[in-house]
Amino acid sequence: MSDVQENLFNHIPGNLFSVLAGPLKEVHAGLLMIIYGQYRKTIYTLNKDMVIDLLCEYLESLDEGALLDLEEDEEYRELSRSVRERANHMLRKLTDAGWLVQEQYYDYSFKITIPDYALAFLEVFHKTCSGYRMEFKGRVLSIYQNLTGEDGLSYVALHQSAEDTQELIDGLKRLNHSIKRYTEKLMEAADARSILSQIFDEYHNKVLGEQYYRLKTSEHVSKYRTRILAKVREWQSDRTEIMHQAKIMVTEKQTENPVQGENQIYDWLGFIESSFLQMDEILEEIDRRNAQYARAAVERLRFQLQQGKGMEQKLAVILSYLARKVQVLGEKGETPAEVMNSIGLFPQRVIDEFSAKLPPRKSSPHKPRVQETREVDEGTREQKLAKFRRRVKEEITVQQINDYVHEMMHESQSLPLAELPLQTREEWVKLIYVILYSNSKRADYMLTGPKRAHVPLEGGAIEVPGLIVKKKEGSR
């Protein structure tokens, strides 16, 4: 389990999401978004009376279905019919859940604020509801300018470039998923009006828009990629500057020691390099999905415009005609070409592997073939066996590591990894196996301690995990 999962509810209240479950979840979500919208317009706090007025206005505007859900809530039903009292009740519920914080000021007025964790969640909710699209314009240019500007050889510019790269990749992933989702919605459109609305009102305006086309034309990734990668590789080859920037990071309290600073800088450089080297893959996937959407839109629209009207009547006439022919000519009579032209609505000549809907495939039966056996001469056999014996001899098993750990620990029940002997290559290999085999059921020991802590050795030249080897219960 990751540290984020373990520590999540150390940072947020345990009942934070309780108001977003149950029959009143839509009402609570609407109230939160109303408060969040007003909070974005202010510098810091909201006056409580103003928040109550907003909640009253929202409750009075609810439709009949939402009002019935409210009346079914026991606490809400016990309140008086006063909308203001009910608004105060809702505000208390949101405050108790941890979405809002209410503070009393020196003038005895009450102010409402949104804590940092709730603000992050509400921002995501707002983007989801409003169909937020990343503005790709200038994103690649910003990465290029940060790396090649006057402050290009600073960890601050590098960090900003890595964050911009992460946002660019995340935006492209969201765009790719959105095209797939809108293709599925297009297949559900029932008439030509709905199809046209999906294409122009939804897909073009909310999914692609001008910013993606600009990313593919005037601000294409290839325009800056070569120079970005050249700058990244210049960084990677300048160990002196990286060590200097790592020391600055320690001075400015961005990291605990120079080794961590160097590792962080190399991580940023590696991420930027791999992202720009592999970005064509997701861009091609987006282009493929976009072309798939265009084909699906044309086919759906053509079907509705050309074949939608009177199709039932047309089929009834054709089937009636065929029934009469069967009575006269028998079942094996040849069907006239004009009838086949009417029935063959969408002749399929080839299978399109990029189609939105692929045909089912039947697995072919297995046809075993006779395998010819070959005789192996004794020299080759002995050579293979000798190679296998050497490999088995060199292999380090769980039992060997158990013996090694018990030998190092002697009578003690625990031992830090940093205290294991690490002078020779074999000892370093055994350290790696101690860490790898710690999760094995056959291991007589386990590793405890903070997962991300490191212990510097040899004056900080190297680091090992700050874990502790501990004997399992019942082990020897």
Image: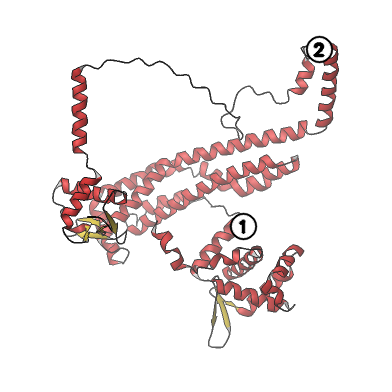
Measured from the top left, where is residue 364 in percent x and y?
A: 53, 23
Q: Amino acid at mark 1?
A: Cys
Q: Amino acid at mark 2?
A: Gly
Please, is residue 276 above or below residue 337 in the view? below
Circle 2 residues within 10 Å: few <14, some 14–19, many ≥20 = few
- Circle 1 residue: 129
Q: Quadrant of residue 325?
A: top right
Which sits in the foreground, 100 or 441?
441
**Is disc 1 placed on a helix, strand or loop?**
helix
**Is disc 2 placed on a helix, strand or loop?**
loop
Which residue is located at x 31 percent, y 61 percent? Answer: 450
* Residue 444 in the figure: left or right of residue 151: left
Please, is residue 444 above or below residue 52 in the view? above
Q: Quadrant of residue 29?
A: bottom right
Circle 1 residues within 10 Å: few <14, some 14–19, many ≥20 = few
Which residue is located at x 62 percent, y 38 percent? Answer: 293
- The reply to whether the C-beta atoms of the residues labelled 1 and 2 are less than 8 Å apart is no
Which residue is located at x 42 percent, y 41 percent? Answer: 278
The N terminus - image quarter: bottom left
